[in-house]
Image: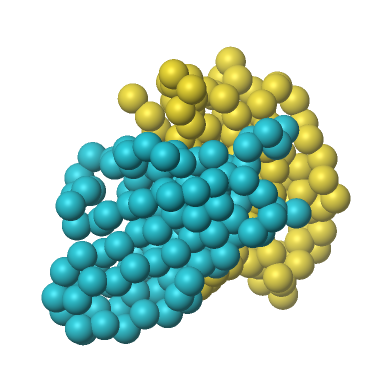
Chain colours: A cyan, B yellow
Amino acid sequence: GAVVSQHPSWVICKSGTSVKIECRSLDFQATTMFWYRQFPKQSLMLMATSNEGSKATYEQGVEKDKFLINHASLTLSTLTVTSAHPEDSSFYICSARAYGRADETQYFGPGTRLLVL
Amino acid sequence: GQNIDQPTEMTATEGAIVQINCTYQTSGFNGLFWYQQHAGEAPTFLSYNVLDGLEEKGRFSSFLSRSKGYSYLLLKELQMKDSASYLCAAMSSTSGTYKYIFGTGTRLKVLA
């Protein structure tokens, strides 16, 4: 199968600090990676789409200067939450779409819980 | 516009059959996905339909009608572990870029 890892799985930080979350596709090359945010009892909200070697495409209402996305290689994308505030506390999930696979699905990482105090 | 609708909650009994419906309006439609998400965990892939018809995979089946913008997920022989949220997602493809539009999810409770 296709495995996506995320690190860290849990982050607790003080307000005003920056937090970096890594998303890796372990056994396949990911042409596209997606970053989602999910608040309790709500569905996934797409934040941005990143393609390797190009700038990320952000969804309406998502501040690109606050949520920095870097897709440096076909197996790694990072999301940096800059100057985090308590309202940024959420479950952040990345997913990767595999290059050349027929099933067209995205494979999700296990998610990162961010708590900003 | 892009829109996905599915019921918010459903309840069913262990051993029964339940059907979760999903309607969508998506430009550049390129497939319909169902994911299962247990509380506190990331979603896991269940099924993918791009052509009209029924896809069966064990206890789970998924149906798609592109002309009606309609899909359903059918769960048979329900088990307690099937209690989870079920997310319907449409893939939209425009100019070579892909995006998945998610519904709000259907929380299924399976009762003993």
Residue at x 45% of width, y 75% of height: A8
Q: Quadrant of the C terminus of chain A?
A: bottom left
Q: Quadrant of the N terminus of chain A?
A: bottom right
Find residue A60 and report its image quarter: top left
Residue A53 appears in the picture as rendered = yes
Q: Compared with residue A106, is residue B82 higher up or lower down, i.e. above or below?
A: below
Residue at x 85% of width, y 50% of height: B58
Spot occupied by residue B4 in the image (x, y as percentages of width and height): 44, 36
**Identity of the residue furthest to the right in this view:** B58
Residue at x 20% of width, y 83% of height: A14
Residue at x 67% of width, y 49% of height: A28
Q: Compared with residue A26, is residue A20 higher up or lower down, i.e. above or below?
A: below
A31 on left or right of B13? left
A57 on left or right of B35? left
Q: Compared with residue B25, is residue B99 higher up or lower down, i.e. above or below?
A: below
Spot occupied by residue A101 in the image (x, y as percentages of width and height): 70, 36
Find residue B65 and report its image quarter: top right
Spot occupied by residue A99 in the image (x, y as percentages of width and height): 63, 37
Q: Compared with residue A62, is residue B25 higher up or lower down, i.e. above or below?
A: above
